[in-house]
Image (cartoon, rainbow, N blue to C red):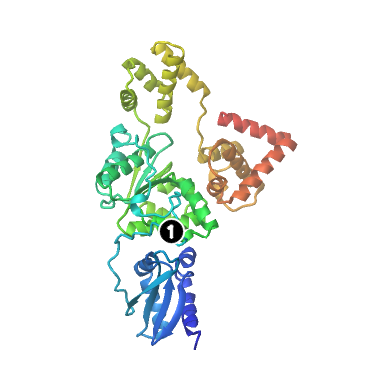
């Protein structure tokens, strides 16, 4: 029959669809075109050599089983791999044949991609037209190195693990290396220092730093432009992938799904992953369980608030690198009073230098205390969504666990809405992240909750009074 190859392939797809994730099916099987069946040999066309290699690495078993079910134990698969034809603008195929089981070249060999700007090259989401591994900008800050990172009891484990990873990326038990801490305690600095050290020791390796929000935006843009395969292929080329603030993946199911497959490919290929978060994996909400389980595969290292000695060392390192002389007792005054995080500590030092320079005043303890008083007075306490939920639940006298339950009880629904309202106004979290952490809701529910709270504040005096009382408890 003229259409036998379509029937055979469609029957294979019915089985494959039920056995692989939906995004994997769309990415790796929908683009395949069946060409012919001849003597129990099915010929399929795939869009690139990388595509063929990935099928061989990840899906050879299910391809073999489904094909044998359709064509018998003697079934064979023949690939027609599309290649770019130099200068002609056409496509040049070549063929690979295997007898029911892969005899492809060994895994993990480097895949070099065409450098021309033809329409069939893989798109680099960092807007470099046409890519080759050596042309990927690592997106690293050159001042964030191990030499600029001050070690103390608060970060010794994380720094030691980071040093080990940088010496042997992908070759230690710390894969992934999961760094977590509150904001401003140096996890981004340490993650980038790993990248800088790898680039110094192994110039041939491809290192990439990207924050979770940029990764998400790139994926959304790639999906909009039908370049999802290119997006996936690009990230699978990386040797050391550093993802900052992975908690921002919360509630973004499609982003989590594509990152899950990138994670699997890199980990199985012996590549290194470094992840940072404001919480340990066990406390992350709105994340797929299979992704959380992989976050726990390597080492999770906490970074605490630095003690006084470490804070003083951080300031000394900063002024030394900047070539500035400040009396030690002034540095100790700053370190004693600014205890929240390293970022605010360095901000206080910058303010002190600015006051001294602009007002032509000597740097003294008196000037330092004036700067400290101004900063402490004007700073607001950073709140987390979990802290907001606790304060709201205490006010309404309900247990915090009830916010996560699927119930329509009025008092619980209202408390949940109030918690969403304050989370939106007092944190930088996305609507999706807020919803996922408060009852497992979506962003539309959070928007509706905020509108409901605003309307009730205008029409219900008692409710408005409750909101004001909660605001006082939140100290805003």
Question: In the rendered image, which quarter contains the C terminus?
Answer: top right
State the residue in front, 412 or 238: 238
Check the image and report above or below for 249 versus 453: below
Residue 279 horizontal/vertical position (percent): 43, 43
Residue at which label 1 appears: 122
Residue at image coords 35%, 30% = 306
Of 318 and 159, nearer the camera is 318
- Foreground residue among 4 and 439: 4
- Mark 1 surroundings: few (<14), some (14-19) or many (≥20) residues within 10 A: many
Percent position of residue 467, x then y:
64, 34
Q: Position of residue 23 (x, y in %)?
A: 48, 63
366 with respect to 326 (left or right): right
Q: Is residue 143 left or right of residue 442?
A: left
Q: Residue at x 49, y 70 (%)?
A: 30
Query: Does the rendering let one see residue 285?
Result: no
Q: Answer whether residue 11 is visible to the viewer in this image.
A: yes
Provide the secondary structure element on which disc 1 rests.
loop
Looking at the image, the residue that sits furthest to the front is 87
Above or below residue 232? Residue 32 is: below
Q: Report the residue at 65% width, 51% height from top.
A: 408
Residue lying at 64% horizontally and 45% vertically, measured from the top left = 449
Q: Position of residue 274 (x, y in %)?
A: 35, 47
Question: From the viewer's perspective, is residue 114 above or below residue 144?
Answer: below
Circle count:
1
């Amino acid at each position: 029959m003229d259409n036998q190859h379509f029937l055979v392939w469609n029957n294979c797809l019915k089985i494959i669809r039920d056995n692989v994730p939906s995004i994997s099916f769309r990415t790796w099987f929908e683009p395949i075109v069946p060409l012919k069946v001849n003597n129990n040999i099915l010929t399929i066309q795939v869009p690139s050599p990388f595509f063929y290699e990935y099928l061989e690495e990840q899906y050879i078993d299910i391809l073999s089983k489904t094909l044998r079910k359709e064509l018998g134990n003697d079934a064979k698969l023949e690939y027609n791999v599309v290649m770019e034809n130099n200068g002609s603008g056409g496509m040049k195929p070549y063929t690979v044949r295997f007898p029911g089981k892969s005899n492809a070249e060994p895994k993990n060999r480097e895949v070099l991609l065409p450098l021309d700007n033809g329409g069939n090259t893989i798109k680099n989401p960092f807007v470099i037209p046409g890519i080759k591994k050596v042309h990927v900008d690592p997106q690293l800050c050159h001042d964030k190195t191990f030499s600029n990172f001050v070690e103390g009891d608060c970060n010794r484990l994380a720094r030691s693990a980071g040093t080990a990873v940088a010496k042997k990326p992908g070759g230690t038990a710390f894969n992934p290396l999961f760094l977590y801490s509150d904001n401003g305690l140096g996890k981004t600095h340490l993650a980038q220092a790993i990248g800088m050290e790898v680039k110094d020791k192994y110039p041939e390796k491809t290192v990439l730093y990207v924050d979770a929000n940029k990764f998400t935006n790139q994926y959304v843009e790639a999906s909009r432009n039908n370049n999802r395969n290119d997006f996936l292929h690009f990230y699978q080329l990386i040797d050391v992938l550093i993802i900052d603030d992975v908690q921002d993946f919360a509630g973004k199911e499609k982003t989590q799904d594509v990152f899950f497959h990138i994670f699997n490919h890199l980990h199985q290929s012996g590549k290194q992953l470094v992840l940072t978060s404001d919480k340990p994996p066990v406390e992350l909400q709105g994340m797929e369980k299979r992704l959380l389980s992989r976050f726990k595969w390597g080492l999770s290292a906490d970074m605490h608030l630095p003690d006084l000695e470490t804070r003083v060392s951080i300031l000394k390192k900063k002024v030394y690198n900047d070539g500035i002389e400040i009396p030690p007792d002034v540095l100790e005054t700053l370190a004693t009073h600014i205890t929240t995080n390293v970022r605010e500590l360095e901000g206080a030092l910058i303010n002190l230098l600015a006051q001294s320079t602009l007002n032509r005043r000597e740097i003294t303890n008196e000037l330092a205390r004036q700067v400290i008083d101004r900063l402490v007075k004007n700073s607001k306490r950073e709140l987390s969504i979990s802290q907001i939920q606790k304060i709201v639940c205490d006010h309404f006298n309900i247990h915090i666990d009830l916010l996560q339950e699927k119930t329509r009880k009025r008092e619980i629904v209202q408390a949940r809405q109030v918690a969403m309202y304050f989370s939106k106004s007092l944190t930088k979290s996305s609507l999706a992240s807020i919803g996922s952490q408060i009852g497992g809701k979506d962003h539309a529910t959070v928007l509706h909750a905020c509108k409901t709270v605003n309307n009730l504040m205008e029409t219900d005096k008692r409710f408005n009074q409750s909101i004001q009382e909660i605001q006082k408890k939140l100290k805003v």
